[in-house]
Image (cartoon, rainbow, N blue to C red):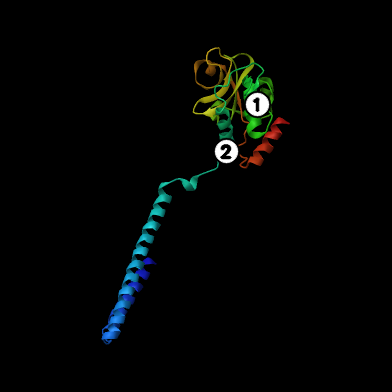
Amino acid sequence: MSKLIKSIACGVSCLVLASCANLNTEQRDTASVKRDTIELNSRALVAVLERFDEAQQAAVELQENTSLTEYKLPGLNESLLDRSKTLLGTPYRYGGSSRATGFDCSGFVGYVYKQELGIELPRNTQGLLKMDAPVIARADLEPGDLILFNDRGRGRVSHVGIYMGDDKFIHSSSSRKGGGVRIDKLSSRYWNASYLQAKRVLNEEAQEPEEQVQWLSKIIE
């Protein structure tokens, strides 16, 4: 389209130049002014069209070289993890369930779900273990899944954390050294030996926040 307009602009200039050759002096002077004006306008038009072509090409390259068209709004699992990371460093406290007093493991998990999603999970690890939510194989863990532990395979469930991806989970640790809300590796010696079960509270098939909340409500009922 830009080539067509350029051709028209050039054609107009040529017609004006040809008609000026048959006019008298006064008319030629007037025509000369008009001719110069038309030439300037024609050049300006051509320059604008060239810049338009450049802008079009730049837009095409931008679309091809970026992932803007693939952008997706953050899911609930991402917002859940973002909320949990704001609590890093909060001290451990047995029975604690708030930022002000500190957290135990289930208090931390319950606080994150309550504050971010408005959902109340079972208060202790036994309740979380019995919760009617899908059990997930360790190889299929996804960010946001709950991970339940015991003490190196001995005894009943005793700890819970939230899987973050990349072999990491966030939890409130009762360790005397570096206790409180922190991030650990699932493959570390102790946690690897203590792994018991994982449960998926966030439903991948529920795309909208309202659907997620409905799914969570069914689990807690």
150 relative position to 70: left or right: right
Label number found at residue 110: 1
Label number found at residue 79: none
The location of residue 111, given as percent across then percent down, is 64, 27
Taking the view exactly as shown, the residue that stands out farthest to the right is: 221
**Disc 2 crowd, CA 10 A, few/some/many (<14, 14-19, 20+):** some
Q: Quadrant of residue 102?
A: top right
- Residue marked by disc 2: 75
Where 115 falls versus 65 (above or below)?
A: above
212 relative position to 73: left or right: right
The location of residue 26, given as percent across then percent down, is 28, 85
Where 148 falls versus 63 (above or below)?
A: above
Q: Nearer the viewer, residue 154 or 41?
A: 41
> CA gap, disc 1 to disc 2?
19 Å
The location of residue 50, given as percent across then percent down, is 35, 62
Q: Residue at x 37, y 64 (%)?
A: 48
The location of residue 123, given as percent across then percent down, is 69, 23
